[in-house]
Amino acid sequence: MCTIICTVRTVLWYVMSIAGTLLILIALFTNTWLEGQLSINNLSSGAQGIMNTVTDIGNNLASGDLANAGLKQVGLFIDCKPITTNAFFENECIPNVETIKTLFTDLDDTKYPHAWRGAVICFVFGLGLMVLTDLFALLTVCCRRCICCSVFTICGSIQSFASILFTLGLIAYPAGWGNDLVKNQYCAGDSNAFVLGDKCTIGMAFWIAVAGTVCTVLASSLAIWAYQSTRSSKCEQAKDEGEHCICLV
């Protein structure tokens, strides 16, 4: 029979791990990574640019947001359909499946910035690793060692790698601001790599991704601390006394 151990440190690690995962997940499915305004550049960037502009205006008018009818928002995925009913959070959107399929088959930089492709890979791969550690974290309540080392150590190492991937994604995204598509469609021709200019601003979703990255870094740091709490003298004493459910502060 396994011994269930729950401490404040392990709970804090669980919460931080889940918070990092959820924040990155929300950021990926939010279309407010970058916010710009309608300009003459939108009408002179070809048929696709005009179509995207008309669609953005139509979505703003349909939602009753007349004051921001000229506001142009874009997420990590350019073709992301806003959820208008039963949305879990504000500005939630679902990427077009066909667009995702061609994201890494049609490597045309004029349709999607290469830097943003790299950001997508980093965030998706890192998110997958975080989901994996969240599942392993559920096992640590009862099973805290795996063959040669602790589950906490394994999860902490994986979370460290995930935080590196998220950081690379956060760096890759502004590197794509100098792309002609982003520059003309959202920043009125006034942006360069890592420099937005005066015509567009960083949206809330980017800062949510930053918060998720910080939570992931903290979770990776707390993993060892959490493991040590399950090996404390009080914990060992409780196990020697035959307790199978141990809760410690």
Image (cartoon, rainbow, N blue to C red):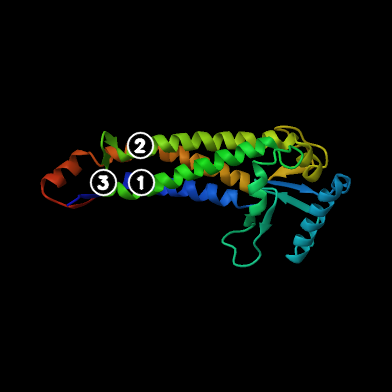
Q: Residue at x 81, y 50 (%)?
A: 48
Tell me the SS state at disc 1: helix
Mark 1 neighbour density, 10 Å: few (under 14) some (14–19) many (20 or more):
some
Mark seen at residue 136 = 1
Cα distance between the residues tagged 2 and 3: 13 Å
Question: Could you tell me the amino acid type at mark 2?
Answer: Ile
Three-letter amino acid code at the position of disc 3: Cys
Task: Check residue 143 in the rendering and tell me which mark sits there, or answer none.
Answer: 3
* Residue 35: % across, % down: 72, 47
Task: In this rendered view, identify the residue nearer to me: 128 or 92.
Answer: 128
Question: If you read the primary sequence from the N terminus, does the residue marked by circle 2 or circle 1 appear first?
Answer: 1
Q: Residue 168, percent across and down?
A: 57, 33
Residue 66, above or below 147? below
State whether residue 173 is above or below residue 141.
above
Q: CA distance from mark 3 to mark 1?
A: 9 Å
- 191 with respect to 82 (left or right): right
Amino acid type assigned to the residue bearing label 1 in the image: Phe
* Disc on the earlier residue, 2 or 3: 3
